[in-house]
Amino acid sequence: MGLRVVKAHHAEMIYQHQYSGGYSEYRDVQIAHNKRKLKNVWADDTTLSAIAADLQAHGLGASGICHGARNGYEVAWFRKTLNGDVIGTDISETATDFPDMHVWDFQDENPDWAGRFDFVYTNSLDQAMEPQRALSAWRKQLKPGGRIYVEHTMAHAPEGAGEMDPFGAHPMAMPYLFFVWGRGDYRLADILEIAEKKNNAQRAWVFVLEGDVPA
């Protein structure tokens, strides 16, 4: 058995995994891990409640989309709490096993969703092969005044990145990335700080992006 050299990411602020097999390999890996973790839920009531409160404070929540939602936990939670039309996506065909879920690669634009939603929520930006492209696609899904909520923890940092979760960034690097990636398209409007997630005791930061950029 040959030795495999693995690059250490723990000292890096930003890391993007490269797939030797390109997009096809990325897609296969994502679907395989989705099925392996199908019953796992990362979203938690504490974080989702903070997002719901922010939405309500801004008169939003009637419609939304949750990307990388796997088994649809957050979709069902937002639909019940906000009494809104909320749907979800996942790259795996297993998405349709759950209510209001759609099979979709969240990095791709969907004309049917253009300008349709009050909000976008994800805790899965780390699963993007091209996170900048994903955010650009999500921006186009917002209604005027809509907001994107990106949940991030130290588990989303470079040391946790690799084949399964190809994008990793230290939480302190995220505002820089949003500034660079979002120039003229979206901006960082707020950061919701969650001292401890209910389901795994992680500290979380929810980066709130607005699509209405002042000229």
Image (spheres, rainbow, N blue to C red):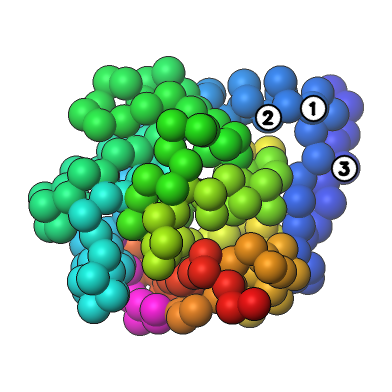
Q: Measuring from the top left, give residue 83's x and y in whole percent.
A: 11, 52
Quarter assignment of residue 121: bottom left
Query: Which is nearer the N-term, disc 2 or disc 3?
Result: 3
Q: Which residues are magenta?
A: 192-199
Q: Which residue is mark 3?
A: 5
Q: Which residue is mark 1?
A: 22
Which numbered disc, 2 or 3, marks the residue closer to the eye? 2
Alpha carbons under labels 3 and 1: distance apart:
20 Å
Residue 64 located left or right of residue 170 = left
Can residue 107 be seen in the rendering of this structure?
yes
Q: Quadrant of the C terminus?
A: bottom right
Query: Residue sitting at 59 percent across and 35 percent down?
Result: 108
Q: Measuring from the top left, give residue 209's x and y in whole percent.
A: 50, 69
Q: Measuring from the top left, give residue 45's x and y in whole percent.
A: 21, 62
Query: Residue sitting at 62 percent across and 21 percent down?
Result: 28
Q: Is the residue 89 above or below the residue 182 in the image? A: above
Alpha carbons under labels 2 and 3: distance apart:
20 Å
Quarter assignment of residue 59: bottom left
Q: Measuring from the top left, give residue 166's x and y in whole percent.
A: 67, 45
Q: Which residue is mark 2?
A: 26
Alpha carbons under labels 2 and 1: distance apart:
6 Å
Query: Residue sitting at 32 percent across and 21 percent down?
Result: 96
Mark 1 neighbour class, 10 Å CA radius: few under 14, some 14 to 19, many 20 or more: few
Q: Residue furthest front?
A: 215
- Residue 23 painted magenta: no
